[in-house]
Image (tube, rainbow, N blue to C red):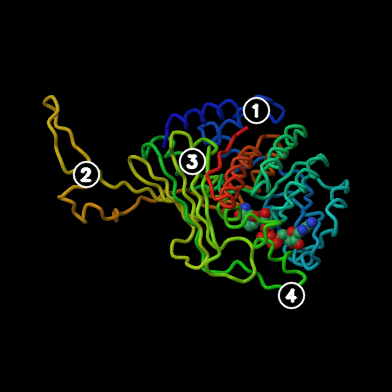
Amino acid sequence: MDRRSFTQGLSALALVSSASLSSSALQTAAGAAAAPAAADDTRAARQIAHTTINTPLRLGLIGAGSRGQELVRSFLRVPGVRITATADVYPPRFEQLDKVCGYQVARHADYRALLDRKDLDVIVIATPLGLHAEHVLAALKSGRPVYGEKTMAYTIAQAREIVAAVAASKQVFQVGHQYRYSPWIRAALARVQAGEIGDVTHVLAYWNRNNSWRRPVPDPSLERLINWRLYHKWSLGLIAELGSHHMDIANWTMGSYPVAVQASGSICYYRDGRETDDNVQVILSYPGGRRMVFTSMTDNAKQGDQLWLYGTKGSLNLTLQDATFFYEPRKVTAVKEEKGDKKQEPVVTSASYSPANEMPYRGPGKSVEVKDPEDPTTAATRAFVYCVRTGERPIADEHVGLGSALAVVSANEARVAKREVEISAV
Ligand SMILES: NC(=O)c1ccc[n+]([C@@H]2O[C@H](COP(=O)([O-])OP(=O)(O)OC[C@H]3O[C@@H](n4cnc5c(N)ncnc54)[C@H](O)[C@@H]3O)[C@@H](O)[C@H]2O)c1
């Protein structure tokens, strides 16, 4: 890891540890960095613990599909929360949501009717990506706090519009990057920040599956509504749907937004009329020449979903359930005398090349132990409610959302244009 960038990120965020949403210093500082800091960790712990207040909170949900229902399951674990109303354009969702809640939730076919209600305290949005900005901006305009799913927006202009709208509204906004609330990822990255694996120069992330991503459709007229992930109008494909989580963790690790990106992809197996690629490869560049590589394929799940942080003194593996450090011994072949001191030289490929020297490190890893490895979405939703009740700025705020949107949207642009795309943070 580039410790300097990390430290710069830390001091920027230290400025904002306990500020309220109305502070303009906070808007600037939070935008300047995406790294964890000691103060940031304290704030995260306070938000996730959420032990103090249980005042009633009436929630309105726009988009009651698979993720909307999952979010509701999590929100209902927070004392005081009630799901009051929902808006969806696909009627079967209403009954599904009632089953999750155990009571009937008021139904709207048009999200604007939901936002017109006077009995809602917060709005949660889990609609397809192409609709995020329209729904988030309207919800903020209605004067309520908003939890909006990732990727924050379909275009960079929309993402910036959301950042400005949050500032203007002074409302709490949290983006669905729930891994910022993952106990094992937070614990592991705090150790990385303390220098445990040296300077992290590379992040390598896989999200591989062996299924088509296609959902069954009861009627062909519903194909694009139900399988929206496969069509450009609503989706930025695997880069957004899976890569956004990894790119967010890379931004967090690097303490910076990326500065450039290269990307490619193709349809190599599922030739079923889809528009979005069934495999993608992305290379993000960060300040100091550091790199993040994201690859996703959908016809082989061997690597699953995992992320590696490679540092000069070791490596960290992150999965959806755990974190493991590895410390391979440094490979040395030569000992050189230098002014009387013996200095070890690293291995060089030469005539004495030996396959054994080039083998992957297969030594045991050391797991990161956490007291309560709870589901990150449960922690994230509880933390959001804490922020709504206290006015505190969420950890996964609109600047975090902007960071992954910059990476995702620019990667998609690079994929289409078949060239490197520069990313400007402003
Ligand atoms: N944070 C995470 O880990 C995570 C996981 C899964 C999905 N997501 C995100 O959640 C969002 C939704 O994904 P999903 O899997 O639930 O999709 P989904 O298709 O299951 O649900 C989307 C819902 O939105 C509804 N909808 C579509 N147009 C609408 C409109 N104009 N007004 C109101 N409702 C409308 C659909 O009918 C559907 O019920 C996506 O942005 C996705 O990336 C995030």
Mark 2 / mark 3, whichever is N-terminal: 3
Check disc 1 and give the amino acid type: Ala
Q: Secondary structure at mark 2?
A: loop
Rate crowding at label 3 as few (under 14), some (14 to 19) or many (20 or more) other CA atoms within 10 Å: many
Number of the label disc, if any, that sits on residue 344: none
Query: Are discs 4 and 1 less than 8 Å apart at CB?
Result: no
Measure how far apart labels 3 and 1 are at the Cα level: 31 Å
Number of the label disc, if any, that sits on residue 348: 2
Rate crowding at label 4 as few (under 14), some (14 to 19) or many (20 or more) other CA atoms within 10 Å: few
Q: Would you say residue 163 is visible in this rendering?
A: yes
Measure how far apart labels 2 and 4 are at the Cα level: 61 Å
Ligand 1 shown in quarter: bottom right
Rate crowding at label 1 as few (under 14), some (14 to 19) or many (20 or more) other CA atoms within 10 Å: some
Mark 3 / mark 4, whichever is N-terminal: 4
Specify whether 361 is left or right of 175. left
Q: Secondary structure at mark 4?
A: loop
Asked if disc 1 is less than 8 Å from ligand 1, the answer is no
Mark 3 / mark 1, whichever is N-terminal: 1
Q: Position of residue 362 (x, y in %)?
A: 29, 56
Q: Is residue 348 above or below residue 98?
A: above
Provide the residue designation for mark 3. 285
Q: Position of residue 316 (x, y in %)?
A: 40, 47
Check disc 4 and give the amino acid type: Pro
Number of the label disc, if any, that sits on residue 218: 4
Q: Would you say residue 67 is visible in this rendering?
A: no
Out of 162 and 174, give the one closest to the viewer: 162
Mark 4 / mark 1, whichever is N-terminal: 1
Check disc 2 and give the amino acid type: Val
Specify whether 379 is left or right of 315. right
Measure how far apart labels 4 and 1 are at the Cα level: 50 Å
Provide the residue designation for mark 1. 19
Q: Secondary structure at mark 1?
A: loop
